[in-house]
Amino acid sequence: AQSVTQLDSQVPVFEEAPVELRCNYSSSVSVYLFWYVQYPNQGLQLLLKYLSGSTLVKGINGFEAEFNKSQTSFHLRKPSVHISDTAEYFCAVITHYTGRRALTFGSGTRLQVQP
Amino acid sequence: DGGITQSPKYLFRKEGQNVTLSCEQNLNHDAMYWYRQDPGQGLRLIYYSQIVNDFQKGDIAEGYSVSREKKESFPLTVTSAQKNPTAFYLCASSAGSGKASGETQYFGPGTRLLVL
């Protein structure tokens, strides 16, 4: 069975500072990886995804993530955060096998950007 | 504009009552999903459907039921058997084309269910 661990439940950071949100997954087969962002009382918005190819993936709002197969990680980074980045961020995985195609989510990381 | 709509935004349930949450998509996606979100627990899968007239139980299906009579619609009924229904419910869809690009799920705005 696959699982996703987001190591930090909350990450406080000052505006214009860099940030990294950590995500590790466990799976014995190849995976597709996703990061979503959720603003209060809203649905999830796709930030970026890794399906294949380059391990460095760029997404919306200046975010990027790097897929590291040996460390089974998919950490999300942004070089300079804004107040508007304050939200909850979810890492999710789906495996390369037929059958159940639904996402498995981590428990989320709340990013709090302070002025 | 293509997208996923969920209604209502807020729903109140009385003791012993069944309630139905609506989810509609005009993305021409084959697959649709229902997730439940509780604080600090991320999202958990309730039911999913990969094609019309077929659906599968997810991790927490007890107390819920679904139907998939049309490609664009995937309503979720929260039955009286669900003893702790208060949560934020999110519907999603994906192309489900069998290709990697079809695995990306897109989410609706959610329905918050509260118990009176």
Image (cartoon, rainbow, N blue to C red):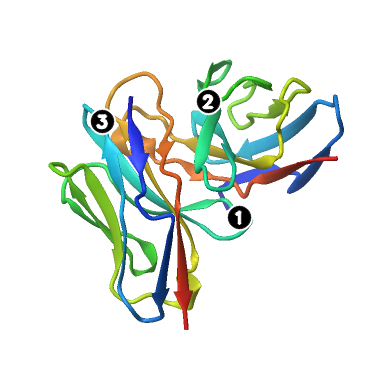
Q: Residue B61 versus residue B23: which sits nearer the camera?
A: B61
In the picture shown, does residue B70 fall above or below B89? Answer: above
| Horizontal side of residue A67 vs A63, given as left or right | left
Q: Is residue B28 visible?
A: no
Identify the residue at the far bottom of this view.
A115
Q: Mark 3 lies on which chain?
A: A
Instruction: Kindly identify which numbered label has been placed on residue A42.
Output: 1
Q: Residue at x 43, y 34 (%)?
A: B95
Q: Which chain carries label 1?
A: A
In the rendered image, residue A56, in percent from the top left (x then y), is placed at: 19, 56
| Horizontal side of residue A72 vs B87, given as left or right | left
Residue type pointed to by label 2: Tyr
Residue type pointed to by label 1: Gln
- Badge nearest the viewer, 2 or 3: 3
Q: Mark 2 points at which residue?
A: B48
In the rendered image, residue B85, in percent from the top left (x then y), is placed at: 71, 33
Residue type pointed to by label 3: Ser
Q: Residue at x 28, y 61 (%)?
A: A64
Q: How far apart are marks 2 and 1 (CA)?
A: 21 Å
Q: How far apart are marks 2 and 3 (CA)?
A: 21 Å
**Badge 1 local density, few (<14 within 10 Å), some, or many (20+)?**
some
Q: Name the residue under label 3.
A: A27
